[in-house]
Amino acid sequence: MPNVTDLVQRHLKEEAAYRLLSAVAHGHPWALQQLSFERAREDQPHLLEKALSIRSIAYMGHLSLKASEAQLTAKGVLFGWPILAISHPYALATHEFALVVKKVHSASVRPA
């Protein structure tokens, strides 16, 4: 039986994402810093503050849509379900999610 990391790489091509989110789930500081902290001040690069950026939300949202579509599609193939009935709503949801992220990002960008 292949390990989980190999399965994720084989079916989703997202080994790095799996490793990052696994590290977040297990409380590794390096992973938490990448997704939920940012520099508090530019002149002090080691001073961090909590911040959940729209990029982090978009990244994790995209991964969750991709992973859930993949497992439902695989189940659909196994049970003979119409694949378009599964993949089409996910394509629409992914598109809508991208539009929302773009809108929120543009609203949160401060003019120079």
Image (tube, rainbow, N blue to C red):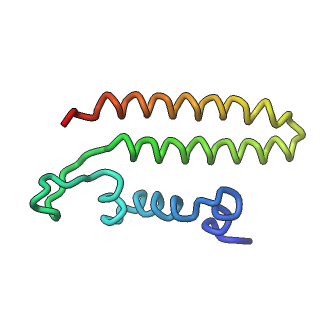
Q: Is residue 31 left or right of residue 62?
A: left
Residue 4 at x, y percent in the picture: 63, 65
Q: Residue furthest left?
A: 43
Q: Residue furthest right?
A: 80
Q: Residue 13 versus residue 103: which sits nearer the camera?
A: 103
Residue 30 at x, y percent in the picture: 33, 66
> Looking at the image, is 34 positioned above or below residue 75?
below
* Quarter of the image where the C terminus is located: top left
Q: Residue at x 62, y 48 (%)?
A: 67
Q: Residue 76 versus residue 84: which sits nearer the camera?
A: 84
> Looking at the image, is 22 positioned above or below residue 109?
below
Q: Is residue 108 left or right of residue 23?
A: left
Q: Is residue 69 left or right of residue 106?
A: right
Q: Residue at x 35, y 31 (%)?
A: 106
Instruction: Give the quadrant of residue 26.
Output: bottom left
Residue 103 at x, y percent in the picture: 40, 28
Residue 90 at x, y percent in the picture: 66, 34
* Quarter of the image where the N terminus is located: bottom right
Q: Residue at x 39, y 45 (%)?
A: 55
Q: Is residue 68 left or right of residue 27?
A: right
The mark tally for this picture is 0
Q: Residue at x 49, y 29 (%)?
A: 99
